[in-house]
């Protein structure tokens, strides 16, 4: 049976498309959610992939969506009346107002000034906005690909300033402080390390409750559960994590009515593939290159994270008569069609590739198309195919 992702009909343009397996996505997310213990809820971080078919697939399965812009609020509402958590380091008054109009569940607040902004907009609408304070903890944290806390970043409120932020939040009449948001890292691959991180969160927040004489109703532990692009057979051990989480949650204070996760990459990465046709193969200064129709303007994740993204080769036997057909047995570096040497998808891969073959990059469902500079050089966009 022909794979609709890699098939090229006669006289068609070269293969360049994303394919998403919605049935596999549905099963994976349903399995993850089913293993969460009582009080734990899974929200989907829309920034990973906000395509409408993805959102419609996930809406019945997750507790809601985590959004980070007014545009994401609008996209989320297009998928149904799902609960929304509004995060992100910059929120304009118009975005806050739009979120309140569609009954956003709560805001994740990143500074004292933002507390005042949300309070003022809420007052103008005659409502009270629920908020969590996002805190940039001092750490220490497990090793992960990206750190948002434990060092200087634009995210959250540093711990020495937290007392002032709590006092401010409590003083504002149109804002209700219900807890804390502690998203500290991205792409952690160790289940045991992630459980240790949650223990650290537990101990830290219980200390804050005593220090500030408050009771936390909601704790958002962020996302940060990762995907191993270097070794696809060594992924985050979710069953082990879920088993440990069930025991760990019993040690959380009973008045913490919600422990919220907001995963993106871990939920959707595996459902997506990116297929590109090899347009040429050549050697330059001792290095073999496969040049493809596509590149980092479609799939920026590899260059963004500076890794060599995994792919498989789909051999294509058809080739125009009379044309030379260059090939390499590797190692080969896969590059795109952009006029920059940074347009690299994979490096030094020991594999046979010919012009006309199709390369399929796996685990492309998260932070691929979403973060790419689509219109650089004005090349055509890839197709997007949703199956199942």
Image (tube, rainbow, N blue to C red):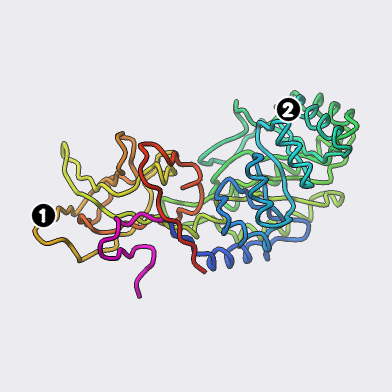
Answer with left or right where residue 204 lies relative to residue 124.
left
Q: Is residue 337 above or below residue 157?
A: below
- At a point 33% along the width and 59% down the height, the residue shown is 312
- The magenta region covers 1-17
Q: Is residue 16 magenta?
A: yes
Q: Nearer the viewer, mark 1 or mark 2?
A: 1
* Position of residue 17 measured from the top left corner of the image (x, y, whole percent): 39, 56
Q: Quadrant of residue 341?
A: top left
Give the structural element (helix, strand or loop) at label 1: loop
- At a point 79% along the width and 32% down the height, the residue shown is 118
- At a point 54% along the width and 56% down the height, the residue shown is 268
* Position of residue 336 measured from the top left corner of the image (x, y, whole percent): 31, 44
Answer with left or right where residue 291 lies relative to residue 377.
left
Numbered disc total:
2
Residue position for label 2: 111
* Position of residue 322 measured from the top left corner of the image (x, y, whole percent): 8, 58
Considering depth in this image, is 266 or 359 the residue closer to the camera? 359
- Find the residue positioned furthest to the left: 322
Q: Is residue 243 visible?
A: no
Answer with left or right where residue 274 lies relative to residue 63.
left
Q: Is residue 349 above or below residue 164?
A: below
Q: Earlier in the sequence, mark 1 or mark 2?
A: 2
- At a point 72% along the width and 48% down the height, the residue shown is 84
Considering depth in this image, is 26 or 163 the residue closer to the camera? 26
Give the structural element (helix, strand or loop) at label 2: loop
Prevalent SS, magenta region? loop
* Position of residue 78 measured from the top left corner of the image (x, y, whole percent): 66, 54
- Find the residue positioned furthest to the bottom: 1
Residue position for label 1: 324
Q: Is residue 378 magenta?
A: no
């Amino acid at each position: 049976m022909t794979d609709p992702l890699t098939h090229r009909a006669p006289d068609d343009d070269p293969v360049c498309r994303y394919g998403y397996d919605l049935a596999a996505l549905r099963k994976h997310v349903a399995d993850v959610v089913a293993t969460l213990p009582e009080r734990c809820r899974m929200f989907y971080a829309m920034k990973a992939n906000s395509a409408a078919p993805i959102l419609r697939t996930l809406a019945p399965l997750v507790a809601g969506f985590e959004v980070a812009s007014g545009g994401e609020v609008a996209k989320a509402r297009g998928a149904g009346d799902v609960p929304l958590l509004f995060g992100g380091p910059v929120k304009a008054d118009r975005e806050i107002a739009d979120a309140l109009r569609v009954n956003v569940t709560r805001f994740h607040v990143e500074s004292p000034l933002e507390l005042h902004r949300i309070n003022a907009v809420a007052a103008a609408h005659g409502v009270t906005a629920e908020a969590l304070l996002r805190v940039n903890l001092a750490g220490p944290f497990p090793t992960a690909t990206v750190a948002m806390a434990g060092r200087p970043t634009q995210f959250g409120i540093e711990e020495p300033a937290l007392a002032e932020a709590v006092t401010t939040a409590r003083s504002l009449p149109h804002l209700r402080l219900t807890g804390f948001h502690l998203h500290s890292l991205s792409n952690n691959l160790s289940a045991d390390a992630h459980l240790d991180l949650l223990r650290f969160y537990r101990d830290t927040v219980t200390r804050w409750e005593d220090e500030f004489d408050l009771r936390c109703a909601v704790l958002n532990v962020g996302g940060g559960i990762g995907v191993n692009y270097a070794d696809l057979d060594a992924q985050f051990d979710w069953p082990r994590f879920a088993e440990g989480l069930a025991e760990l949650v019993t040690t959380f204070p009973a008045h913490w009515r919600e422990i919220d996760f907001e995963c993106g990459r871990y939920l959707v990465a595996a459902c997506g593939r990116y297929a590109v046709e090899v347009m040429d193969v050549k050697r330059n200064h001792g290095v073999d290159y496969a040049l493809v129709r596509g590149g980092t303007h479609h799939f920026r994740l590899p260059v963004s994270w500076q890794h060599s993204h995994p792919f498989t080769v789909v051999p294509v036997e058809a080739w125009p008569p009379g044309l030379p057909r260059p090939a390499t047995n590797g190692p080969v570096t896969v590059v795109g069609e952009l006029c920059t040497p940074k347009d690299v998808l994979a490096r030094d891969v020991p594999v046979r590739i010919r012009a006309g073959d199709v390369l399929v990059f796996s685990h492309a469902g998260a932070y691929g198309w979403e973060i790419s500079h689509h219109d650089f050089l004005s090349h055509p966009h890839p197709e997007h195919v949703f199956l199942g």
